[in-house]
Image (spheres, helix red, strand yellow):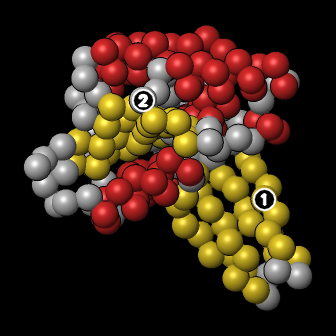
Amino acid sequence: MTGSFLAIGECMVELADAGDGLYRRGFAGDTFNTAWYARRLLPPEWCVSYASAIGTDAISLEMRDFFEAQGIETSALREVEDRTVGLYMISLDKGERSFSYWRNQSAAKTLADDPAWLAATLSRHDVLYFSGITLAILTPQARLRLCNAIRAARADGAMVAFDTNLRPRLWEDTATMQDGMRLGASVADVILP
């Protein structure tokens, strides 16, 4: 059996505490991590892709190269001038992890800003996967645009999975967060609370 799996969201530069004041750099994010595992678990005949927006700077292009090296197809990445990718840093204190984020210039925040690109990208896949973080980083209008495009792809036969992955700090307020979760769930076949 062949198929196509598309994860939609934001991959970020990850800086992880390596000790002695040094940090190890990598690339990670909730939906990207799922794509990474999907590539390892699905049969080789399946195409695993990642949909997002990245910049045109060196770190964005390095991220694209990393995806490809991991076997993740990158034609669903849209390049945005004058943007880059987000960054987060993991700090350790007595074994407990805490996170600091820098994503104001993240191109992924614009991933639903081009309706034609969005519709064409989502329409080519058997399985679509997105998360609450995917929705939380978007403006309310872009959130609705993304969910409408997902709804259209689902009507054309795609199976849709929504991982709530709730991060209250990313949302404008509790009511908007609740509306966003309901919106995401309303376009999904599978909801992962």
Residue 159 percent location from the top left of the image: 33, 31
- The answer to whether residue 186 is above or below residue 70 is above
Q: Is residue 109 left or right of residue 177?
A: left
Residue 193 quadrant: top right
- Taking the spot 77% from the left edge, 19% from the top edge, the residue there is 176
Residue 107 percent location from the top left of the image: 55, 35
Residue 4 percent location from the top left of the image: 23, 42
**Marks 2 and 1 close (CB-CB < 8 Å):** no
Q: Which residue is mark 1?
A: 99
Q: Which residue is mark 2?
A: 189
Q: Is residue 168 left or right of residue 126?
A: right
- The answer to whether residue 168 is above or below residue 152 is below
The amino acid type of the residue labelled 1 equals Phe
- Taking the spot 73% from the left edge, 47% from the top edge, the residue there is 102
Badge 2: few (under 14), some or many (20 or more) residues near its Cα, within 10 Å?
Answer: few
Q: Is residue 92 visible?
A: yes
Label 1: state its secondary structure. Answer: strand
